[in-house]
Image (cartoon, rainbow, N blue to C red):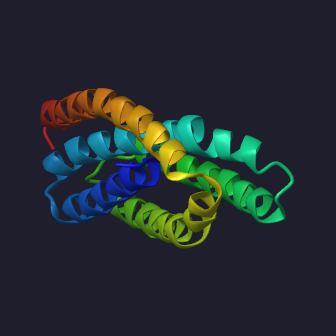
Amino acid sequence: MDALDELEQMHEMARSDFRKIASAGTTDQAGLWAKLHSSLKLHEQIEEQFVYDPVSQDLAGNQQLEQFHEQHEMEASQANQLMDQLGNLEPTDSQWLSTLLELQTMMERHMEEEEGQFWPLIRQTWDPDKLQSAGRSVAASKAAGQVGAAGAQIMGKAEQAIKGD
């Protein structure tokens, strides 16, 4: 798979994980959120390192890319703020679910913009070999990070069980 297909697969997993969290009980929500939080952080690191930073070098001076990059940075900052808020709340807190849903809405809009506006620009710029090469790096990093995300889910669920929620 090429790099953008790998990232899209991560988007689909995040969409699915958001839905699972919203319908789960509070004990399960903590674990599922810990896993998703880890996956979202990993996704951000992977896309920056293997796709966005190299694309920025290849398309230096491209106004469309620069606008997208500014928007991406702003949205990432907003998402991180919401994730920090979630980290300071318990799933039993009424604010927790509303904050999660706000983050979900923001992330879904962001993913749609990436997939519909930015990635076509990358596909026009990078040849298939470059996309495949970046895809191998994305896949390897993704596989390594999934181990950490699974561990985070277990720890989050255990922490919630210890608290008795």
Residue 105 versus residue 138 in the image, above or below: below
Question: What number of labels is visible?
Answer: 0
Q: Kindly indicate the quadrant of the structure image that contains residue 151.
A: top left
Residue at 42% across, 45% down = 40
Q: Position of 150 compared to 113: left or right? A: left
Q: Is residue 4 left or right of residue 22?
A: right
**Residue at position x 35%, y 51% in the image:** 10
- Give residue 141's position: percent from left, percent from top: 38, 30
Judging depth in this view, the residue of 58 and 129 nearest the camera is 129
Location of residue 42 in the rendering, given as x and y in whole percent from the top left corner: 43, 37
Which residue lies at the image location 45% right of the left edge and 70% below the top edge? 105
Query: In front: 145, or 100?
Result: 145
- In-front residue for pair 91/80: 80
Task: Mark yes or no: residue 54 visible.
Answer: yes
**Which image quarter holds the C terminus?**
top left
Q: Residue furthest right?
A: 61
The residue positioned 15% from the left and 59% from the top of the image is 24
In the displayed structure image, the side of residue 133 where residue 160 appears, left or right: left
Judge whether residue 88 can be spotted in this image.
no
Q: Position of residue 68 (x, y in %)?
A: 71, 61
Question: With respect to residue 31, does 97 lie above or below?
Answer: below
Whole-percent x, y for residue 89 in the image: 39, 46
